[in-house]
Image: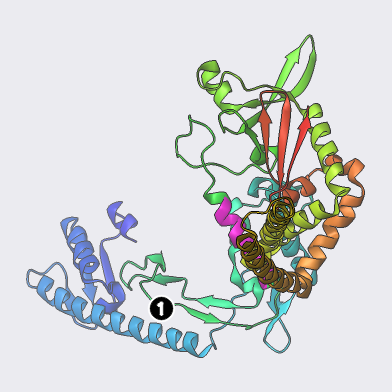
Amino acid sequence: MIRDCRKGKIDLILTKSVARFARNTVDSLNYVRQLKAQGIGVYFEEQNIDSLKTDSEMLIGFHSVMAQAESENISANVRWGIQQRMKSGTFAFRYNILGYKKGENGEPEIVPEEAEIIREIYNLFLDGNSLDQIKAYLEDRHIKTARGNSVWEKHAIQNILTNERYTGDMLLQKTFTENCLTKKVKKNRGEMAKYLVVNNHPAIIEKDMFKLVQMEMARRSNKRVKSDKSITGKGKHSGKFALTDLLICGECGSAYRRRTWAKNGKSKKMWRCMSRLEHGTEFCPHSISVEETKLYDAIHRAMRKVTEQKDAMDLIMAGLSYAVTGDDEVLNVGAIEQEIKALTETMKSYVAIMASTEGDRERYKADIQTIQKKITALRGQLETAKAVIASSEKVNAEIERLKKRFENIDNIFDLPDELILRKMVEYIRVMSEGKIIITFKGGMQIEENL
């Protein structure tokens, strides 16, 4: 209407009351003045006010203040009612997300086909895929969004991965309207109370898995910068190649980057120290380039050696359990076993010294008794930690799934997501002597020639 007035299409505006024209005093007076400057009057029937008359502005301002006060009062009452429903846990479920529909009894009901999509998105993310890769996966399979679109936005995938409603809970008042005048919606960062309704509806995602996803998301968002040419100063997660996050230079500590070398019409994939690529030999003169096939062959040999050692596999599986649960108690399994092993070796050396010398045997006996007490205490902690793992169906299911894939180790690196490598290896150092040192979950290291 205001646009038409500016174009000269309207000569007079008839309005029932000031409250129907605007409930914001500033807007009301501002538009009345604009229209009056163009010779266009506004007539308010209920108050019998004509804006073109000289004494009208004060009356319009007075009634506008009354209208704004009424609007604010209504808004406050509505907000209070909403907050009371949030407090009591009776706030209505919003069916604006994939995976749920309104059931016959009026309660949220899981849509099985859509729930499988949600679970697949969570599994893809935990297997190391980036948001771009998940987006491509969904679009290649012509999977529709909640609004029926074929094109997925990355923020929509991120919203799925961070939405607690998929665990059966509802966190209310995550956003709020600043006021009834600007109607600006803001993210609630502590300005107002939030309300968590637990077990409000059927869950699609287990809470353990949801917790893992949040931890992984936090880890990715806090990755250290790899390139000195980075503008933001933050690292970026890449799910395309597992080695991008695992391979580091043993000389300068920089990450390795995958490059393609082409010569005489032939190309090969190489991995190169990023510091050497960006600055030449000035900062990292001794780092080496590694052909991808040789690198994978060396990793393959190392992992074969690991599978043949029961103690090594126990340590790795302990680390793997922590990767699945994020539980500090589970993390201690690998560290505890290593500490027990070190204390046992120390005790054996003391026994050997006592057998071969006539020195202060009482002091060695006291040391041995102290070590034995430590070992006994550590074994108790170890049993507790193992019991935590054994009682977790989630951990056991994940480990069994990885073990089955581990059985076919000859084809491990044919897998597109390289799941085993991501789950079992902490990092790999490339040394200038033409060898790599692989550090597995749990702290075990294996050295292998390229």
Residue placed at 54% from the left, 46% from the top? Answer: 223
Residue labelled with disc 1? 193
Image quadrant where residue 319 sits: bottom right
Name the foreground residue: 118 vs 342: 342
Name the foreground residue: 367 vs 321: 367
Prevailing SS of the magenta stretch: helix
Residue extending farthest to the top is 264
Horizontally, residue 159 falls left or right of residue 183, namely: right
Q: Position of residue 51 (x, y in %)?
A: 16, 69
Q: Which residues are magenta?
A: 207-219
Name the foreground residue: 360 vs 188: 360
Residue placed at 53% from the left, 76% from the top? Answer: 171
Residue placed at 91% from the left, 41% from the top? Answer: 410
Name the foreground residue: 47 vs 299: 299
* Label 1: how many Cα within 10 Å (few below 14, some 14–19, many 20+): few
Horizontally, residue 398 falls left or right of residue 226, namely: right
Q: Is residue 388 magenta?
A: no
Image quadrant where residue 311 sits: bottom right
Q: Position of residue 162 (x, y in %)?
A: 59, 63
- Label 1 amino acid? Ala
Colour option used? rainbow
Q: Position of residue 280 (x, y in %)?
A: 54, 17
The relative height of residue 108 versus residue 308 in the rendered view (above or below) is below
Quarter in which the N terminus is drawn: bottom left
